[in-house]
Image (cartoon, coloured by chain):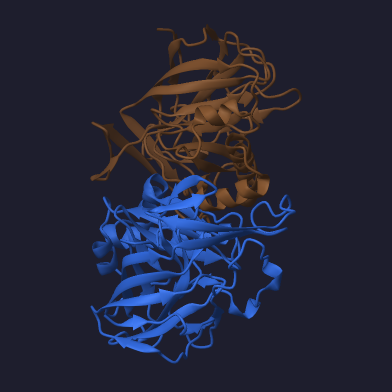
Chain colours: A blue, B brown
Amino acid sequence: MKTIENSKVIYKFKPELEPVEKVQRGEIFKVLTNDCFYGQITSEDQLLDNIDYSKINPATGPIYIEGAEPGDILKISIIKIKPASTGVAITVPNEGALGKRATKSLTMILNIEDGYCDFNGIKLPIKPMIGVIGVATKKDEEQDTATPWKHGGNMDTTDICQGSTLYLPVNQQGALLALGDCHAIMGDGEICFTGCEIAAEVTLKTEVIKNKSIEWPLVETSDYTMVVASGETIDEAIESATEQAVDHMMKGLNITWEEAYILASLTLDIKISQIVDPKKTVRGAIPKYLLSTEQLINSI
Amino acid sequence: MKTIENSKVIYKFKPELEPVEKVQRGEIFKVLTNDCFYGQITSEDQLLDNIDYSKINPATGPIYIEGAEPGDILKISIIKIKPASTGVAITVPNEGALGKRATKSLTMILNIEDGYCDFNGIKLPIKPMIGVIGVATKKDEEQDTATPWKHGGNMDTTDICQGSTLYLPVNQQGALLALGDCHAIMGDGEICFTGCEIAAEVTLKTEVIKNKSIEWPLVETSDYTMVVASGETIDEAIESATEQAVDHMMKGLNITWEEAYILASLTLDIKISQIVDPKKTVRGAIPKYLLSTEQLINSI
């Protein structure tokens, strides 16, 4: 199985990126990812003020997917996320949802074993997820890896996890996929600004859906197809996620826009992904009992 | 079993309210509620511009709970919500998350049968919930029934449903509980501004937890204890919910504030309740595997 090493990283999603590996459609491959600090935090005595900030949020790649062309959708099955044996979680003054109350720094190194993260003796069941995953951007657009947007990026979405399938718009030949910033466990919101930050070994399968385009990423779980949208504010992200979700419901179910808007009010769950990155991210979760992901994509 | 008729309604939660019924601690009783339009919408030809707006969001009650005094917590077990056989859902121009795109009105009368809501042939599994439920407010405070706040009110929270337990602060002698605005089904967000609006028959049991006070309502589900907080903006609601949740985790688990802040970042799920009422509502969901609701309340 091809393995992409975690020394091959990018810090920006751009239109032009030099691929470090090529994979075929349907090929299963492994990506080794760094934690969001590029492994710079190794002790609980370390604070964030003595690390190299140019090395935050490295994404391993880019990976060229044969046959992916602009105007297609890249379908990424997340087969496995194997976490490292330790993770890092940090609070620093003025950061996160309660920044005003956060006055002291605290760095925690957390052991991960047998499916649990040990938080000072409290066992937390892990649910490993990918924080940063994205593709090359459109012409004249550039996003650092800390920012979530239409190409993916730092979506910090708990449902981008083992067993889920992510759909990203292809903007450039070969898509040019890169990923990193995995978390062993994170709550919806990521309220203090870190999850349990880990290096990981991620096993993926990529396929290409030809000639179908989406504006925002989609993530498919066992029960939902979710539109993952970001914005300067949570309200802006909610509006974008809702707009695309209502359009999918209208087209997929062949109903009027007003019917789809009401149906979304009855069935669409707006879920918070994160509120601490340069842009905020939410997901609009469309139940699969209404419309399967395949039906939804076919109707685009 | 005592039954409170749905002709006995209030439109404001105030410090002083005339009770229409008294119940004992631990007594099981029934409350008949109106839909949020007080039954004024009976045909799909009706639009919202020809109804009496002074009769929006009637709450049945107030009910005096013996033994409830200011500084206590009122514990309300939601034993059953039996929906009416039809519901109403409406979109009108300029309303909801996509108000800018909503240009046409649509009124739908939806049949409810055998656990499903029939949406033009699409069967939606119902999950009946209480939209408005609250108690008399503090001195000098008055809230109309359309508004969610610390006393409860129009929280429009999908988890305030059959099988859940709601905890409200007691501000006045007897608590003075009132409720209405049930929905057969609603998505988190209530994005077009209505759920499937129904009259209902609600069976409750109320108990009193003496000398424990909470700032915001709590709702207990099978997996979570959730802080239900509201604010002028979603951000403000998130900050309030997070602040109370982190405090509960700190006290309940006997850890420092910084540890609790990090632990919340790893485990607390911020969930959207509604984004369309005069104030917005979210819930901060604390997993019960960390801390049971009983432990949480005991630690206050």
| Residue sitting nearer the eye, A268 or B261 | B261
| Residue sitting nearer the eye, B89 or B132 | B132
Residue B147 is left or right of residue A226, and the answer is right
Query: Could you tell me residue A240's position as x and y percent?
Result: 49, 63
Q: From what the image shows, is residue A188 above or below residue A50? A: above
| Residue sitting nearer the eye, B201 or B259 | B259
Is residue A156 shown to the viewer in this render? Answer: no
Query: Looking at the rendering, which quadrant does residue B173 occupy?
Result: top right
Query: Looking at the rendering, which quadrant does residue A108 occupy?
Result: bottom right
Query: Could you tell me residue A121's position as x and y percent?
Result: 51, 45
Query: Could you tell me residue A166's position as x and y percent?
Result: 35, 68
Q: Residue at x 59, y 52 (%)?
A: B262
Q: Residue at x 39, y 28 (%)?
A: B162
Is residue A211 shown to the viewer in this render? Answer: yes
Q: From what the image shows, is residue B47 above or below residue A102? A: above
Residue B1 is left or right of residue B284, and the answer is left
Q: From what the image shows, is residue B120 above or below residue A110? A: above
Could you tell me how many numbered marks the image carries?
0
Query: Could you tell me residue B12's position as x and y percent?
Result: 63, 25
Query: Looking at the rendering, which quadrant does residue A286 occupy?
Result: bottom left
Q: From what the image shows, is residue B55 above or below residue B256? A: above
Q: Residue at x 54, y 70 (%)?
A: A36
